[in-house]
């Protein structure tokens, strides 16, 4: 029995799409889902090679691929989408339909996983917590504006300049920002924080940390620069077919999540989190450490009684 997801979950979902994935696109989404799921198991398995206090990066990285696996399962099942009228209708039969399928579940995935990915990166360089939170906020703005832009059919999707009549100077040009513009500005702030600020902090912590952070940071920002290109060709401009969109985004996500995770955890193999200013209590080691310092209750009571006896002066006849 083959893939029946498109037969079970058809192309009507409150609205009907005539510009959508085919069975090949669904198969690809399921394949990416499998890679994400296996990656989560591998990352969690590797966490057991570390003590509990050293597992934070394994947990975060496994969470990234776990959420992505669920999102890709939804897309492979032809769920988590809506249809939006395209701004640019094309003559190419593969994208000729005027109601394009938009997977909003992809943006839910990004809304959850990209902050986790940034946490992986920015904790590695020891960036201050307020700065990390602000970078994550800018990242969420980037994701949300990408979603809203994908769901808009007019020129507000991009932002453009338009001519307006003026009684004083004649025609002039008014710039109208769009959601793609807002998202791009937010992304540039994130890129600056990762590439410039992050490396400055990582340099203080040691060459091994700087090397790991630089490799993972440059890898991430380079890939993230390609996401707007994918967006412009698919949800934005309706240039490539939905199956091609699936392949483009899928390859980027595989490199940006399991690929990133492998690089990060390899770089962290000999880095203790305490060097990054992270202090996590381990119940097992903390108990054994405290047990060495804390006397047994009976010994403690005997010691107190002994001190009390010594404190009492014997009476002289």
Image (cartoon, grey):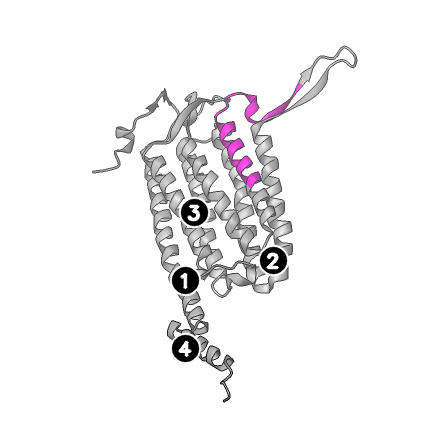
* Vertical comparison of 142 with 271: above or below: above
Residue 93 shows in this picture: no
Crowdedness near tag 1: few (<14), some (14–19) or many (≥20) residues, C-alpha within 10 Å:
few
What segment carries the magenta color? 137-162
Q: Nearer the viewer, residue 264 or 132?
A: 132
Instruction: List the single residue furthest toward the right.
Output: 168
Instruction: List the single residue furthest toward the bottom.
Output: 317
Q: Position of residue 232 (x, y in %)?
A: 52, 32
Q: Residue at x 44, y 23 (%)?
A: 84
Q: Residue at x 47, y 31 (%)?
A: 234
Gap in Å between the C-alphas at discs 2 and 3? 23 Å
Disc 3 or 1, which lies upstream in sequence? 3
- Per the image, the residue denoted by label 2 is 202
Local secondary structure at mark 4? helix
* Vertical comparison of 48 with 195: above or below: below
Marks 3 and 1 in Cβ contact (< 8 Å): no
Q: Nearer the viewer, residue 4 or 106?
A: 106
Q: Main secondary structure of the magenta part?
A: helix
Marks 4 and 2 in Cβ contact (< 8 Å): no
- Per the image, the residue denoted by label 1 is 283
Foreground: disc 4 or disc 2: 4
Marks 2 and 1 in Cβ contact (< 8 Å): no
Gap in Å between the C-alphas at discs 3 and 1? 26 Å
- Per the image, the residue denoted by label 4 is 302
Q: Is residue 299 left or right of residue 139?
A: left
All told, the count of numbered labels is 4
């Amino acid at each position: 029995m083959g893939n029946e997801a498109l037969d079970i979950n058809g192309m009507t979902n409150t609205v009907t799409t005539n510009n959508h994935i085919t069975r090949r696109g669904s198969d690809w989404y399921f394949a990416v889902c499998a890679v994400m799921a296996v990656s989560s198991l591998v990352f969690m398995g590797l966490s057991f090679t570390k003590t509990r206090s050293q597992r934070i990066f394994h947990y975060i990285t496994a969470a990234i691929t776990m959420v992505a696996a669920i999102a890709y399962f939804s897309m492979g099942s032809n769920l988590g989408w809506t249809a939006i009228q395209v701004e640019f209708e094309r003559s190419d039969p593969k994208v000729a339909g005027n109601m394009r399928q938009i997977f909003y579940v992809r943006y839910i995935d990004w809304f959850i996983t990209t902050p986790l990915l940034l946490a992986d990166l920015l904790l590695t360089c020891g960036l201050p917590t307020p700065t990390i939170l602000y970078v994550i906020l800018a990242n969420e703005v980037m994701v949300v504006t990408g979603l809203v832009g994908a769901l808009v059919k007019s020129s507000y999707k991009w932002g453009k300049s338009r001519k307006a009549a003026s009684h004083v100077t004649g025609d002039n040009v008014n710039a109208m920002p769009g959601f793609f513009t807002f998202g791009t500005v937010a992304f540039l702030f994130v890129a600056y924080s990762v590439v410039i600020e992050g490396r400055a902090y990582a340099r203080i912590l040691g060459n091994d940390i700087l090397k790991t952070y630089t490799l993972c940071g440059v890898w991430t920002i380079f890939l993230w620069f390609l996401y707007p290109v994918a967006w412009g060709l698919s949800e934005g401009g309706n240039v490539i077919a939905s199956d091609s969109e699936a392949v483009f985004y899928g390859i980027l996500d595989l490199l940006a999540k399991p690929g990133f995770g492998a690089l990060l955890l390899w770089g962290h193999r000999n880095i203790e989190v305490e060097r990054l200013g992270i202090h996590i209590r381990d119940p097992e080691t903390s108990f054994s450490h405290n047990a060495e310092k804390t006397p047994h209750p009976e010994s403690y009571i005997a010691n107190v009684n002994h001190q009390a006896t010594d404190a009492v002066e014997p009476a002289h006849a």
